[in-house]
Amino acid sequence: MGTSIRDRIGAGPLARAGLLGGTAVARAAEVAARIEADGIETVRLCFTDQHGILRGKTIVAEALVSAFVSGLGMPSTLLLKDTSHKTVFPVWNGAAATDALPFAGASDVLMVPDPDTIVPVPWSPHSVMILCDVADRAGAPVPVSARTILRRAVDDLASDGYAAMMGLEVEFQVFERLDAALDHGQATMPPAPVATRNLTQGWQYLTETRYGEAEDLLDTIRRMAAAMGLAPRSMEIEMGPSQFEFTFAPSDPVGQADRAVLFRTMVKEVCHARGLHASFMAKPRLPNAAANGWHIHQSLLHRSSGENAFTPATPGELTTEAAGWIAGLLDNAAASCLLTSPTINSYKRFAPFQLAPNRVQWGWDNRGAMIRALLQPGDRASRVENRVADPTANPYLAFAAQIIAGRDGIARGATPPPATETPYDETAVALPATMIEAIEAFEASDLFADRLGADVVRYLAHIKRAEWGRYLSTISEWEQAEYFNLF
């Protein structure tokens, strides 16, 4: 049976189009056979959309071979939505059809299952999940697909003789759900926020007693993450009420991005089943809530030797690669923000003296600086930490931004300014204060236009401009309080 399945997949449209190579075909046949042997009932085929949200279809296990043969169709409009899930491109007049956007008429694109990404769904043991790439009906990868964008950046870096390693720290909150906001009037786009209250009081950073209060939940999340192969390293009590942090072992960029979207999805689903609400929002509008950061640890390895290119020979020294990488991250910081801090709410987090950056600076082991250098002689884990991102970021796009910016600095032989000891110095260059500033910086970047392609830049900026436009047209509570009585 295994041989016939392999032959069938190998002769299918995906394999003929080169979307499944010989190794992937063999792996797909193994996965299909294993699923049958394990008695798995359903397979969740998911892809990561432009916002880093997993979308997809659940199929019966018997249909998986067909998905490996031909892919699984889905509406292309899923790639054209803003954060309210509204389609923001004109799909009915042909305007959404370009080389990068073959989406006129709300036509189908294909989910292409990646057999190397199969993971168990431990909170639903009759099911497994497989991540997918996105291709058009002709069998070409869709260039605006986030996973495709990151793969291209990784390949470009490999052509320079380097491989990137990414580490992950994710902060988030988990609350008790008091009201699921299921009344008919609350079923809007976007839906009404759920009502919650805290699980812990907070403001006792890393205290053992707070950990004890949340241990049952954190143990559950840890066990689920480990069962999925996400390689969790630590579970921590963060500063704010009901706020936690998980860290993960370093990995290649695509693998680490896969972990990030799987972790975020798992946490939300597991917590929902327990009557809880997990939020990765950058800065929730809740009394006394703390902001959530997503710190991206990154280093370069020489592909020829596997040695860390950032490890210095002497204390206080920057290798050529580390200097160029840091300079590239700083020089392209404003343009990168749309990919690392992608929501209107993200920019409410950039505040002085809050352990989040608001200036374009770097420092030696300085948690207030945008770039924190953790570089020591003999330390194979020498790395830099970009503290600008938050956990609403699409990890594929955020990692691609790091690689594109850092690689640019190395290619130019750039060097960073002196390290800062005053990361909130008001005379230093500020990070974008609003999302529209980030959009305009991204649109104006020749580097991102060259590396991503002008169509991809226009696509991402268009989606975010739609979000910004809805924000501006909404009458806020501040406006009502400011003007309703006065005039």
Image (cartoon, grey):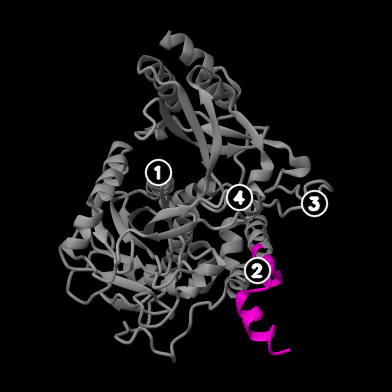
The nearer-to-camera label among 1 and 4 is 4
- In the picture of the structure, the residue carrying the numbered disc 1 is 266
CB atoms of marks 3 and 1 within 8 Å:
no
Q: Residues within 10 Å of mark 1 (few under 14, many from 20)?
A: some
Q: Amino acid at mark 4?
A: Asp
- What residue is shown at x 64% (from left), y 85% (from top)? 482
- The disc label shown at residue 183, or none: 4
The nearer-to-camera label among 3 and 1 is 1
Which residue is at the front of the view, 123 or 111? 123
Q: State whether the magenta stretch is mostly helix, strand or loop.
A: helix
Q: Amino acid at mark 2?
A: Tyr
Q: Position of residue 24 (x, y in %)?
A: 44, 27
Q: CA distance from mark 1 to mark 4?
A: 26 Å
Q: CA distance from mark 2 to mark 1?
A: 29 Å
Q: CA distance from mark 3 to mark 1?
A: 37 Å
Q: CA distance from mark 3 to mark 2?
A: 24 Å
- In the picture of the structure, the residue carrying the numbered disc 2 is 471
Q: Look at the numbered disc 3 and give the secondary structure of its residue.
A: loop
Q: Position of residue 476 (x, y in %)?
A: 64, 74
**Residue 305 visible at all:** no
- In the picture of the structure, the residue carrying the numbered disc 3 is 95
Q: Position of residue 412 (x, y in %)?
A: 45, 70
- What residue is shown at x 72% (from left), y 43% (from top)? 102
